[in-house]
DNA sequence: CTGTTGTGGATATTTTTATATCTATATTTT
DNA sequence: AAAATATAGATATAAAAATATCCACAACAG
């Protein structure tokens, strides 16, 4: 007994900084750089070296003693930690302004996400292609989720529709929902929801501005 | 001496939760509700009552003792704290996928923002209207900023262009930049930058999912 | 070879943020 | 009228996150 291996919990803030590191490491790798120090990264990110050091240590990034972190190895470590080393099939529900914009974002493949379907209720959108992704009618959600083996839902529908669609998703076995609707979704405990609220950032900006 | 009035610093996390409260209070106000308790709000938001209580106390929301927070007064308090009680003239630089999507978002007027101009370099976009907002050529930035008395910049350009445009904005006297480009901008200390990174949220989702 | 510098690694400290506990008292219930 | 309940308000505690400090040693300059 006493041998529970408590892999030290990684903080949310650290997790949220990882993509930023990843972008920089991709660049460095492109330039053929093999090692990079936390002080260098600190300049790029405007964070403190110690923060970066601890973040990278937390995900097990390999380093050469007293010389810096190994670029290729760190990329692998971060990608593995986030599960971005292989692609999850994702789909979008709601192809409005925001949905279309996200579909147009080419970077998701670097983020472990492959968007393979979209859903909407508007007749003029259904059956069309938006940025190369086919749009199905929302009524087909359950069917297509199973047929295409979809895993992650991106929810960009109006607030009023969000909970109803969420219930459908949960029944269809979806375990991860990235929620852009301004609502708090109610889901079973085994379903993970990540809520994005763009006005939170605006509030932060305005508060800083008033100071 | 010793009479410096240190208005107690409000935490970033509290600030980021304010818009969520505001949405709920708007709804309640629409229903004619005059008082609401922190326990009720806790159910709506999936936060703890104590968090809400402290957040609202922090912005000076008025309450009736042992009965709840006053709906109308709390709206006023939050709006005032964020400076959302009167509109700031904002503009968008970069009318790509994301820029257009944001221009289509009708809610900014509730968030103290009035988007009155947009800028892009692509000839086919310049002089057009996107969601009722006129698109100027980026070369005209400085001129139009002064002529229209613009205050807040929303930056939705590619990473490679972001710093250059930022320099132009700073020279034109802009003091607040809402940055959606995946770069850390360098600005003088009196300029406020709020950086949004959508992949941070995705990272959080993926990390939760792996657990 | 010698001294200097910069580094990851480890640990300690401080600050921030979240959570718990207690109190007096309006409001509601009996 | 009396008892029970729920509330803001205040304070105390715990947890999380950021920051500082120290160390041994690679890398490098001379």
Image (tube, coloured by chain):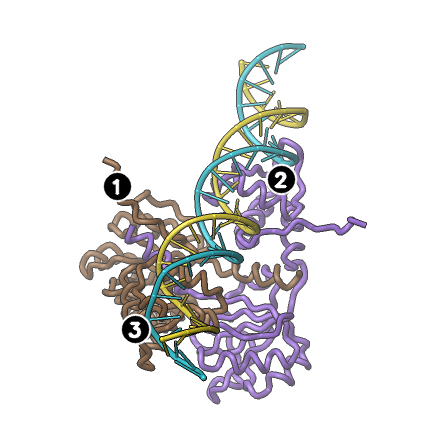
Chain colours: A brown, B purple, C yellow, D cyan
Q: Is residue D17 left or right of residue A124?
A: right
Of the numbered discs in the image, which one, if any, rests on residue A189? Answer: none
Q: CA distance from mark 2 to mark 1?
A: 46 Å
Mark 3 crowd level (few <14, some 14–19, many ≥20, 10 Å Cα) = few
Residue B183, image x, y percentages? 46, 73
Discs 3, 1 touching: Cβ within 8 Å: no
Task: Write the residue at 54% across / 81% down.
Answer: B165
Mark 2 lies on a secondary structure that is: strand
Mark 1 lies on a secondary structure that is: loop
Of the numbered discs in the image, which one, if any, rests on residue A4? Answer: 1
Q: CA distance from mark 3 to mark 2?
A: 48 Å
Q: Is residue B116 left or right of residue A128?
A: right
Identify which residue, A3 or B74, lies in the foreground: A3
Question: Subunit of mark 2?
Answer: B
Of the numbered discs in the image, which one, if any, rests on residue A129? Answer: 3
- Mark 2 vs mark 1: same chain? no
Q: Quadrant of residue B200?
A: bottom left
Name the residue carrying label 2: B69
């Amino acid at each position: 007994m006493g041998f529970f291996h408590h892999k030290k919990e990684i903080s949310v803030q650290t997790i949220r900084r990882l993509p930023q590191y990843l972008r920089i490491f991709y660049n460095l790798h492109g330039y053929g750089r093999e090692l990079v120090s936390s002080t260098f990264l600190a300049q790029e990110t405007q964070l403190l070296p110690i923060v970066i050091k601890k973040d990278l240590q937390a995900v097990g990034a390999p380093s050469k003693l007293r010389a810096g972190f190994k670029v290729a190895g760190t990329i692998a470590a971060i990608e593995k930690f986030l599960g971005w080393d292989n692609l999850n099939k994702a789909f979008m529900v709601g192809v409005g302004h925001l949905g279309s914009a996200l579909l147009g974002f080419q970077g998701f493949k670097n983020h472990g996400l492959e968007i393979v379907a979209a859903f909407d209720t508007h007749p003029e959108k259904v059956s069309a292609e938006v940025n190369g992704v086919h749009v199905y009618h929302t009524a087909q959600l359950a069917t297509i989720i199973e047929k295409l083996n979809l895993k992650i839902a991106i929810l960009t529908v109006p607030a009023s529709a969000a909970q109803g669609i969420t219930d459908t998703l949960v029944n269809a076995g979806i375990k991860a929902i990235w929620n852009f609707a301004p609502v708090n979704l109610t889901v079973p405990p085994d379903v993970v929801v990540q809520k994005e609220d763009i006005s939170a950032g605006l509030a932060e900006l305005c508060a800083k501005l008033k100071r």
